[in-house]
Image (cartoon, rainbow, N blue to C red):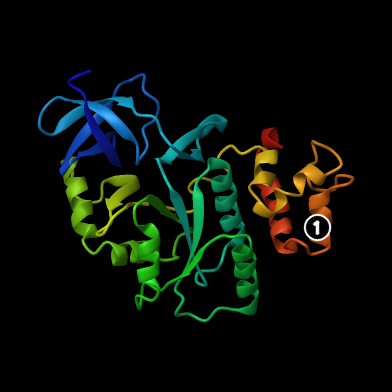
Amino acid sequence: MTNFIEGLVIAHLGQGIAVENKNNIILCQTRRQLDTVAVGDRVLYSQANEHQGRIENILPRRSVLLRPAKSGKTRPVAANLDAVFVVFAVEPFCDFLLIDQYLAVCENSNIAVKLVFNKNDLPSSTEIEKELEAYQQLGYPMYRVSATNAMGLTELNQALKNQVSLFTGQSGVGKSSLTNALIPDKELKTNTISATSKHGRHTTTAATLYHLPESGELIDSPGVAIFGLAGLSLPQLAFGYREFQSLIPQCQFNNCRHILDKGCAVRAAAENEHISPARYQRYLKLIDKMPQSSN
């Protein structure tokens, strides 16, 4: 045990894992019996030589974000997160169903979630503004930014300080532009991480952790809907809608699905517009996306 070194997982590189200890990055394999290692994990590793090692243990996590894997199982996307920042924009389009999906997962993972409305130099619409107002009334912080003209980046930078954050969102909303604006030497850092694998550039295949210039860490995740509904059950999906939480105990039946169930307080609130009818309709759509076993 005395030979083990504590490190931080910053990227997956093909079959290897980049682990950082102080300013050194080494390429590690994992002990065979070990659970899946995620970016953001604190680990104990043994060192074979200057550039290679083996992860021996994963230290306890304070939070973990999961994504669906094969055979109905889940895999960790990122660990020890304090906040998820959901990035979206007018273009390509505001996918509010996807945003609700992210919010539901984070509500069930005990991870704070914040909204980043990028490309704010582009004109919005009355419909979009109405949806955004509903999120803000539920207490979700929202940052209006533009990576193009640096609008709102100071406030966003402030929100990222002193914590581990993850950027996610659909393709084309400008996540990379934002991370490049917030981390001026991002390409240099990416090349340094990639060089660890001895395969040259662009070998990271999943989330990558960067240190922000002032303080805090930012995990940049690829792709659309990276964590899907992540194994949520139907009661967990309902709990993931923040405005449902105080209404659920008022439903006539404990196993209420909040669809056409008799005495459903959630459906009644949506019909009376005490909660957002649009959000309620998206909840029904997400139920249809869930595996039958979760329903």
Query: Farthest residue in the right direction?
Result: 262
Considering every residue shown, the one lying at the far left of the view is: 50
Q: Is residue 27 above or below residue 268?
A: above
Q: Mark 1, residues whose alpha carbon is within 10 Å: few (<14), some, or many (≥20)?
A: some
Q: Residue at x 35, y 78 (%)?
A: 149
Q: In the picture shown, does residue 274 fall above or below 289?
A: below
Q: Is residue 179 left or right of residue 271?
A: left
Q: Position of residue 288 (x, y in %)?
A: 70, 47
Asked whether 279 or 273 is in front, the reply is 273
**Figure quadrant of residue 281:** bottom right
The quadrant of the rendering that contains the C terminus is: top right
Image location of residue 53, percent across then percent down: 19, 28
Spot occupied by residue 180 in the image (x, y as percentages of width and height): 29, 64
Residue 152 in view = yes
* Count of numbered tags: 1
Residue 13 visible to an observer of this rendering: no
x then y, percent, for residue 168: 45, 55
179 or 155, nearer to the observer: 155
- Nearest the viewer among 135 and 97 is 135
Determine which residue is flagged by label 1.
269
Q: Amino acid at mark 1?
A: Ala
Residue under the image location 53 percent in, 31 percent down: 73
Residue 115 vertical position relative to residue 30 in the rendered view, above or below: below
Place residue 19 in its image quadrant. Answer: top left
